[in-house]
Image (cartoon, grey):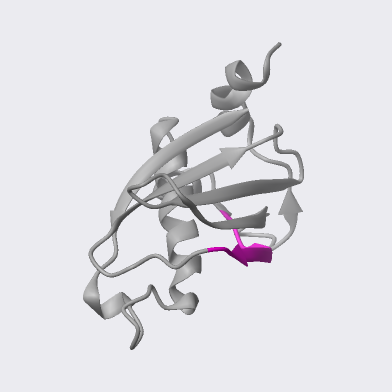
């Protein structure tokens, strides 16, 4: 299993009238977590796109809201890969507030698509090689 944490402060412009993080902004947090988790492995989205010729469209999102994230609070975005990706890469997200209360969970599924052929491909070896040590028993 691979797990990465990233802090993010809730900005005023991201909140609703109640001072809560607007529910429509949560997918942006998934993207922040996903990009930073991949970067932590030594891979960037830019490299995947420019050098490997792949894009990663989202094919599904499942989200659960437990408690609100509030204005000026630092939340922790935990990004988890529970299994080695194959044709689909599944990111699990857990968001916590500063008191370590679980605020939100989500599961986001993406696929790798070759930019030239527009066809789905397996997760590139470049990424799976970086992940191997996290999934060895």
Rendering coords of residue 16 (x, y %): 36, 84
| Left or right, residue 19 beside residue 102 | left
Q: Which residue is drawn at 70% across and 32% down?
A: 84
Magenta residue check for 56: yes
Look at the image and tell me whether residue 50 can be seen: no
User: Which secondary structure class fits the magenta region best?
Assistant: strand
Magenta residue check for 68: no
Rendering coords of residue 75 (x, y %): 35, 53
Rendering coords of residue 119 (x, y %): 74, 59
Q: Residue at x 73, y 42 (%)?
A: 122
Task: Identify which residue, 121 or 23, lies in the foreground.
Answer: 23
Task: Identify which residue, 76 or 37, lies in the foreground.
Answer: 76
Q: Is residue 66 above or below residue 91?
A: below
* Magenta residue span: 55-66
Image quadrant occupied by the N terminus: top right
Task: Identify which residue, 26 or 19, lies in the foreground.
Answer: 19
Look at the image and tell me whether residue 67 can be seen: yes
Rendering coords of residue 100 (x, y %): 41, 44
Q: In this view, does 92 lie above or below 116?
A: above
């Amino acid at each position: 299993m691979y797990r990465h944490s990233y802090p993010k402060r809730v900005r005023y412009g991201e909140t609703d009238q109640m001072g809560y993080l607007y529910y429509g902004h949560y997918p942006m947090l998934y993207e922040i977590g996903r990009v930073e988790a991949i970067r932590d492995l030594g891979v960037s989205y830019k490299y995947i796109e420019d050098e490997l010729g792949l894009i990663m469209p989202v094919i599904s999102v499942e989200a659960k809201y437990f408690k609100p994230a509030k204005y000026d609070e630092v939340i922790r975005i935990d990004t988890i890969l529970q299994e080695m990706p194959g044709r689909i890469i599944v990111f699990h997200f857990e968001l916590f507030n500063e008191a370590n209360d679980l605020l939100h969970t989500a599961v986001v599924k993406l696929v790798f698509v070759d930019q030239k052929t527009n066809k789905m491909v397996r997760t590139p070896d470049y990424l799976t090689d970086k992940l191997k040590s996290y999934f060895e028993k």
